[in-house]
């Protein structure tokens, strides 16, 4: 049995099958194994195998040192021949069966582990001028350029106004892998600022530094013109528009949003975010649509990176719409029981009757008219027999817009 090469400390197993190929019983009285690292396991000795019967053993090789190893298994067997019908044993024969063993112990080769190499790209970040109250974000990448894996345990950003995000630590990078993160500069005051990102890992260079630099610039001023707007009296359900202007001074101003405290007032003509350069202005419109009678007031406020808060006060009064009506009168006709009144939206008709029952009087008030419309009226007389006359002459009524 040749086990080939087996690493020191490991184990290799092969089966050994012992078969009685004769016609008589075979007795295995003992089995012995020699050789360092070899071992025999299986059925206990002594054992008897009848004709054709087999038994399976396991032979293992577990080298304790490097190099070739040899051994042997010795089995002592005997057979009994039976020659007469009475079962008497006439002869007994004994023999020794040997199995040679060999194998080679090998030792693991020693390999050199090259530590990972962590690199930053870029090696420094320059943010330039950033206005106080604003922020700028740049990205950087950490790469394990070669060697074994690298675990980044910690990364911090130092320096006033600098912050780090996008790193979920600890993180392990195999050779060739990268991770990208963000650094934000939000200056708190005007002037130069410097800092660094410090990265700690188990790379060949355990401490890596990325330098940071930026300049905080002064904030601009934002003004609203006019500072207050009065829309006066506006009929409920109608609208009135006024204009205004936003002006930036000192430095550019970025407006992120605007809000109005009363929904009856609305802002239009501009969209956000909006950046106004220093010395420039942007127009806008304000609309007042009262939903009910009474005075309304609101504040329009702009959110920006300006050094000051910019707002405008808004006022207006909602007034109920005027209820218009048309009063009609006509001459009395002889021998009639009443009159019908007809109305059209254009001269000559078609006309529609607007009184529900015959009116015995010679006057009628139409209260269902709309502001700004023209109406055309005619009347007819009705006799006692129900006969209706032809249309009277047509008159026009022009309804005021207010």
Image: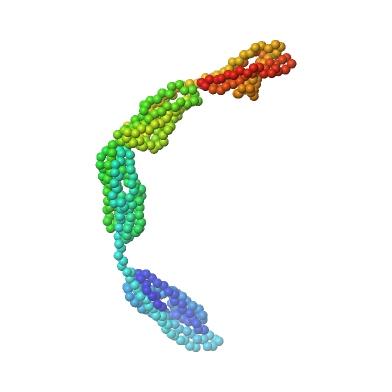
In the displayed structure image, the side of residue 155 where residue 60 appears, left or right: right
Count of marks placed on residues: 0
Q: Is residue 393 above or below residue 70?
A: above
Residue found 43% across the figure and 24% down from its top:
231
Quadrant of residue 343 in the image?
top right
In the displayed structure image, the side of residue 54 where residue 127 appears, left or right: left
* Residue 189: image location, x then y, percent: 27, 38
Q: Farthest right residue? A: 385
* Residue 317: image location, x then y, percent: 45, 22
Q: Is residue 141 above or below residue 41?
A: above
* Residue 287: image location, x then y, percent: 44, 28
> Which of these two is toward me, 262 or 55?
262
Q: Is residue 61 above or below residue 369?
A: below
Res. 34 in view: no
> Which of these two is toward me, 356 or 206?
356
> Which of these two is toward me, 209 or 23?
209
Quadrant of residue 371 in the image?
top right
Res. 207 in view: yes
The quadrant in which the N terminus is found is bottom left
Residue found 38% across the figure and 79% down from its top:
72
Residue found 42% across the figure and 83% down from its top:
96
Quadrant of residue 242 in the image?
top left
* Residue 278: image location, x then y, percent: 32, 35
Q: Is residue 393 above or below residue 253?
A: above
Residue found 31% across the figure and 43% down from its top:
185
Q: How is the image coloured?
A: rainbow
């Amino acid at each position: 049995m040749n086990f080939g090469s087996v690493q020191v400390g490991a184990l290799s197993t092969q089966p050994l099958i012992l078969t009685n190929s004769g016609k008589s019983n075979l007795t295995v009285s003992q089995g012995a194994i020699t050789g360092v690292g070899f071992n025999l396991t299986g059925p206990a000795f002594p054992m008897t195998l009848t004709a054709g019967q087999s038994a399976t053993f396991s032979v293992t090789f577990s080298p304790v040192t490097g190099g070739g190893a040899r051994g042997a298994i010795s089995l002592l067997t005997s057979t009994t021949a039976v020659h007469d019908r009475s079962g008497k044993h006439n002869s007994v024969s004994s023999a020794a069966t040997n199995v040679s063993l060999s194998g080679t112990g090998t030792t693991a080769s020693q390999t050199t582990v090259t530590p990972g190499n962590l690199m930053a790209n870029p090696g420094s970040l320059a943010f330039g001028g950033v206005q106080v109250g604003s922020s700028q974000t740049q990205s950087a990448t950490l790469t394990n350029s070669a060697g074994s894996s690298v675990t980044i345990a910690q990364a911090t950003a130092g320096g006033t106004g600098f912050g780090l995000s996008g790193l979920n630590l600890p993180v392990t990078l195999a050779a060739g892998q990268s991770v990208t993160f963000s650094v934000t500069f939000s200056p708190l005051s005007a002037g130069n600022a410097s800092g660094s990102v410090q990265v700690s890992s188990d790379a060949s260079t355990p401490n890596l530094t990325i330098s940071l630099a930026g300049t905080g610039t002064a904030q601009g001023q934002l003004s609203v013109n006019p500072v207050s707007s009065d829309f006066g009296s506006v009929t409920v359900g109608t609208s009135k528009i006024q204009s205004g202007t936003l002006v930036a001074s000192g430095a550019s101003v970025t407006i992120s949003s605007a809000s109005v405290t009363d929904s009856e007032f609305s802002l239009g003509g501009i969209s956000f975010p909006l950046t106004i350069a220093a010395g420039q202005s942007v127009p806008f419109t304000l609309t007042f649509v009262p939903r009910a009678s009474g005075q309304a007031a609101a504040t329009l406020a702009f959110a920006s990176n300006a050094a000051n808060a910019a707002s405008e006060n808004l006022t207006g009064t909602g007034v109920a719409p005027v209820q218009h009506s048309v009063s009609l009168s006509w001459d009395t006709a002889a021998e009639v029981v009443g009159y019908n009144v007809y109305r059209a939206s254009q001269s000559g008709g078609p006309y529609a009757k607007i009184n529900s029952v015959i009116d015995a009087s010679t006057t009628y008030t139409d209260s269902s008219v709309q502001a700004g419309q023209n109406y055309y009226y005619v009347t007819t007389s009705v006799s006692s027999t129900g006969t209706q006359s032809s249309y009277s002459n047509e008159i026009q009524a022009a309804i005021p817009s207010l």
